[in-house]
Amino acid sequence: MNNLFRSARNFLASWCLLVLFLDASCKKEAKSPAPVNPGPGTKPAATFTNPLLNAAPDPWVFQKDTTYYYLHTLGNRIQIWKTGKMSRLKDATPVTVFNAPASGGNSRDIWAPELFFLNGKWYIYYTGSDGNDREHRMWVLENESPDPTQGTWTNKGKLTTQPADLWSIDATVFQQDTSLFLIWSGRPFVGGNTDLTQNLYISRMSNPYTLTGPTVQIATPQNEWERRGFPVNEGPEILRNPAGQVYLAYSGSYCGDDRYSIGLISLKEKADPVSAASWTKIAAPFFTGQASSNAFGVGHNGFFKSRDGKEDWIIYHANSAAGQGCGDARNVRMQKFTWTADGLPSFGEPVATGQAISVPSGE
């Protein structure tokens, strides 16, 4: 009986030790689980934050296939940033393609450069002056190289408006089938006129560096939101919706006003662009600043598609604080936008600085 009791006691002790060992092993294992490989679709989405670049007013992007060429105002030169991923723009190394000469009509105020690929060649349209405000005009550079960051840029001279050579800035090209048009912001400085009002004008082009006239005014700052500081319509940019409807986005009010915003004008279908009656301005602004997003003076934008062509993006400048004016405090930002059932762009509100944004699809 004693032997039986002793055997049972030993068995029970061994069992308890086994249980304690297994329990300790389980607890140790719970503290250090084996790594688990994430399954498909569990990888965190790639993101970026605004601003993309600082000291970068008047941003512009031209997209050719899956390559993006970016430019902005630098004052005394023109540089091109080349990248395959707009969300990584800051990683691109800019290439200087133009330095302002020491004197002449394009020696100062090198503003708002825009790059286009037309008739098999590259063109850059930019504003320049001799330092006198009344002498601001539009100028053109040409390059035959397949890559605009390489080859030689040739000065094609000044774009002279017809019939009078008028104050003009912010040139952009509108191509309709095989016809070329230039759209810009101008002032009717004639004689001793000192009116600072900036209107939008259009003219036909016989080639990418020649206006054939006449100059036609297609918009003037008539709404209250376009007249803050002084009356301004500037920074015109063409935008087409998925159905092919043509819109003209533009910036309204003095660029140094915190309420500087983006408006929209529509072109009637199959209408002659060189006719004021063909363009209809939408009264309210379409994209405005927001203090909670650190976005003041939102404007002078451009548009591009994601690498896979599935998304539409707007790129624009803004100040990060109130009262920073119309200078190098402006920084460049971008965000995706959509379209309404009526075919109008829906830009939403500016995304706050520092907020994570998913990169454009295809990156």
Image: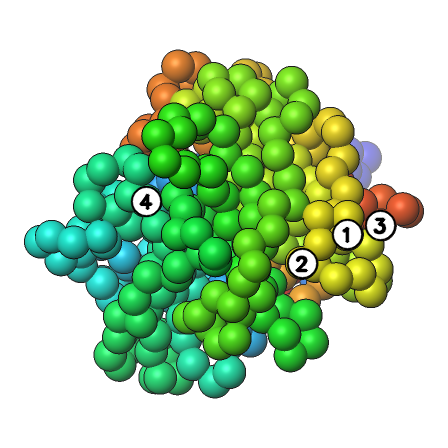
Q: Which mark is residue 343?
A: 3
Which picture quadrant has residue 41?
bottom right
Q: Which residue is mark 2?
A: 274
The x, y position of residue 336, in whole percent, is 65, 47
* Outermost front residue: 191
Question: Label 4 amino acid?
Answer: His
* Picture residue at 42% right of the left edge, 18% below the top: 321
Q: Is residue 275 left or right of residue 320?
A: right
Residues at marks 1 and 2 touching, judged by CB atoms closer than 8 Å: yes
Question: Eyeballing the image, is 125 above or below 345?
Answer: below
Q: Earlier in the sequence, mark 3 or mark 1?
A: 1
N-term mark: 2 or 3: 2
C-alpha separation, residue under disc 3 versus residue under disc 4: 36 Å
Please report contact status of discs 4 and 2: CB closer than 8 Å, yes or no. no
- Please tell me which residue lies in front, 106 or 94: 106
Lower sequence index among marks 4 and 1: 4
Which residue is identified by label 1? 278
Read off the residue under disc 4: 136
